[in-house]
Structures are given as C-alpha cells and as structure tokens.
C-alpha cells in the first residue's frame, strides 16, 4: 500500500514531494504556497516539461548509484491543472516509478481521467478536508466540500486510494472529530492531520491565534479515543499518528517502552531527513513549509542537493534547542515547520510541545 512508502519514504528510499505548479482554483486561508519569498519566482518560472523529464532522469541515475528507491508525491497548486501532467506520470512510469501519490484539488476529476491516472501508476490521490462544510468552504472556497466528497467517490470507483488530510488550527479544531467520523463513513483509505505552519497565507490569518501546548495535548487525547472507537467498529480507514508529539503522549499513556521501538518507523522524526521537496521553479527545499533552499533543478545535481551542508544542518539533532535534551529526540523532534511559523527558527521549541525535558533525562 502506497501510504507505507510515501509517508515513511522508507529507510532505503528517497521521497520526492514535487510541487509542479502554483496554478490553483482555491486560495486557502492557511496555504504556505503564497510565501512572498518563493511564490513570485514559481509563478513566473514554472519548469517546462523537458526540464522536468531531465530532472527525473538524473534522479534515477542518482538513486541507482545509491541503491535507493524514489517515491513521488506530485502536488501544487493543483497538479491536475498542468496540461502535461500525464506526460510526466508516463515518464515516471517508464522509469519504473511505483505507487505515485497526487495531492490535488477535487474540481477537475472525472472517471475517465481517474482511470487514466490509475493506468499511469497513481496509487493514491490525497484530498484535503479542513472541516465540516461551513468551515471547509470558508477556509477554501464555496462548494469545495461537496466537490471533495464527489471526487472521493470517483477516485474510489477508479480503484485509487483516497487519503484525507486535515490541516489543524485553533479555528477548525472543533470540526476535527467530525471529519474523522466522515472519513470513516465514506470509506477513505487513510486519514491524518497536520498542524498549521504560519507561513504564506497562514502567517497573515493564523499566527496571532496559536494553539497552546496543553490545549493540543487534550485534542490528541480526544482524537485517540475516537480512533479507538472507530477501530473497534471495524473501520476500513487507516488512522494515522503522523504528528511526532504522539510519541510523548503514548509514553505517558503507558503504550510505549521508552527503550523503543516507540512507534511505526514511518512516523520517525521529520521528513526532512527522508526526502526532498521541489518547487514549481525547480528550487529544491528540505521542507515545503518553511524556506529551506538546497539548490535548483535541473542546474543542481542530486548529489549536491541531497548531500548539501544545508540539509545536513537541518537534520542535526544537537541544533534543536529543546529536543536535544529529550529522551525521544531520535523519533520525535516535534515539527520544525511549526516552530518556524511561530519563532522564525526551525530549531526553536515546538510551540505545542508540553514536555518538560528535565523530567525525561533519567
């Protein structure tokens, strides 16, 4: 199942989250795409098809030398709005890509297109649902909620997995349990949520009202109870514990042996150590949710990007001000992007982490 691969990027793999375009029907209140540092260049300098194919070919040359398996997650904007998306997918398929994930909008999907995506190796199409109808449409655009439910049905008919992602903030926390139940009711393949990072539009709309640490801990407890209730009912939905702050919570609940292994390997630490993000203009980033440039494709080589000192610095444990003192630093680190959104520093303490590291040293 692709989820095991794309979320973990696997110990022997390299995850590529590629934002093919900034074209988008929506202008979401929390979207990181509209970061003033990156958006103007992405808008003007979208990579043409030949440069994308060249970058894919050089990726396979690199991964073959390193004995790695590349995994693709194509996003945007909305990648469906690129007229050459099927050519890109076909080239990936030709190179042997497996279990491709698309993160896109619901508006332009129909059954013939979804069947073609399936033929080209798309195993999953992630749809964002950020609340029940009123909240979701206010965050995204009127009609988006109903369009998302319609698209999920079409994807399911085409045999494509349907993960749902929820971006959590104080403004939509009241709807989180409702969306979890909705994911179960419609048979979504997977459900997970991530906390908002206050960059791009999120900085303007959400930074002034951050969620407190103990407030977030209470949310996790309620979510866990709902997950367990639905699992007892035999739900088909895989409910994810993506946020690394599940680690201290599960330990406090007595679910984890502090000597490990603590949680599934797919959730260990930040994805910065397991993959690369590429923007629409070819800029390589360690993380899409804060400015972390590593080079630019196709001019930069994959060796230069993956082995760059900037990337190594961003994954060095001792640089994390609070986490370096924590027993669980090998599997947690909170979320550097959330820390950046609050403090303009990815190494600052995660603002929703409630752990007193002094109590965890022995």
Image (cartoon, grey):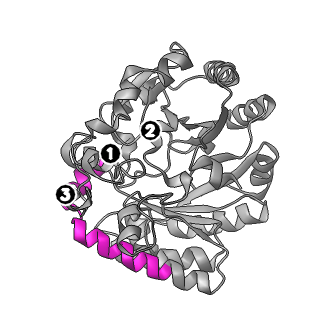
Q: Is residue 206 magenta?
A: yes
Check disc 3 and report the residue beneath it: 358
Q: Which residue is at a point 37% across and 33% down the rendered structure image?
A: 39
Q: Which residues are magenta?
A: 200-226
Q: Is residue 217 left or right of residue 127?
A: left
Check disc 1 and report the residue beneath it: 336
What number of labels is visible? 3
Q: Is residue 221 left or right of residue 266?
A: left
Numbered label attached to residue 272: 2
Along the polypeptide, which appears first: circle 1 or circle 2?
2
Residue 133 image position (x, y, % from top left): 46, 74
Neighbour tally class for label 3: few under 14, some 14-19, many 20 plus, Cα within 10 Å: few
Neighbour tally class for label 2: few under 14, some 14-19, many 20 plus, Cα within 10 Å: some
Q: CA distance from mark 1 to mark 2?
A: 9 Å
Q: Is residue 6 above or below residue 184?
A: above
Residue 214 image position (x, y, % from top left): 23, 70
Neighbour tally class for label 1: few under 14, some 14-19, many 20 plus, Cα within 10 Å: many
Residue pushed farthest front?
A: 362
Q: Is residue 103 left or right of residue 100?
A: left
Quadrant hosting residue 206: bottom left
Q: Which residue is at a point 35% across and 72% down the rendered structure image?
A: 252
């Amino acid at each position: 199942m692709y989820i095991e691969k794309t979320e973990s990027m696997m110990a022997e793999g390299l995850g590529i989250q590629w934002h093919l375009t900034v074209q988008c029907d929506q202008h979401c209140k929390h979207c990181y795409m509209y970061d003033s540092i990156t958006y103007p260049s992405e808008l003007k300098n979208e990579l043409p098809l030949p440069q994308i194919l060249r970058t894919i070919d050089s990726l396979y040359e690199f991964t073959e030398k390193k004995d790695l398996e590349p995994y693709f997650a194509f996003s945007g904007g909305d990648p469906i709005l690129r007229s050459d998306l099927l050519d890109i997918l076909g080239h990936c398929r030709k190179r042997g890509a497996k279990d491709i994930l698309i993160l896109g909008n619901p508006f332009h999907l129909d059954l013939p297109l979804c069947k073609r995506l399936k033929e080209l190796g798309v195993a999953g199409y992630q749809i964002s649902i950020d609340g029940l109808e009123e909240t979701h449409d206010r965050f995204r655009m009127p009609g988006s909620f109903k369009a998302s439910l319609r698209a999920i049905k079409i994807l399911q008919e085409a045999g494509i997995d349907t993960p749902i992602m929820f971006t959590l903030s104080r403004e939509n926390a009241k709807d989180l349990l409702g969306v979890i139940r909705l994911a179960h009711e419609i048979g979504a393949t997977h459900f997970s949520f991530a906390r908002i990072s206050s960059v791009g539009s999120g900085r303007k709309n959400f930074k002034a009202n951050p969620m407190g640490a103990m407030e977030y801990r209470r949310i996790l407890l309620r979510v866990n109870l709902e997950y367990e209730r639905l699992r007892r009912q035999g739900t088909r939905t895989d409910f994810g514990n993506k946020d690394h702050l599940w680690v201290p919570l599960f330990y406090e609940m007595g679910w984890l042996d502090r000597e490990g292994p603590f949680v599934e390997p797919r959730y260990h630490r930040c994805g910065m150590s397991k993959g690369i993000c590429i923007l629409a203009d070819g800029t390589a980033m360690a993380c899409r949710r804060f400015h972390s440039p590593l080079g630019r494709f196709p001019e930069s080589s994959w060796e230069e990007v993956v082995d760059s000192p900037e990337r190594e610095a961003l994954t060095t444990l001792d640089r994390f001000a609070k986490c370096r003192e924590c027993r669980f630093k090998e599997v947690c680190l909170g979320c550097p992007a959330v820390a950046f959104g609050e403090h303009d520093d990815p190494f600052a303490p995660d603002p929703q982490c409630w752990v007193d590291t002094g109590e965890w040293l022995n």
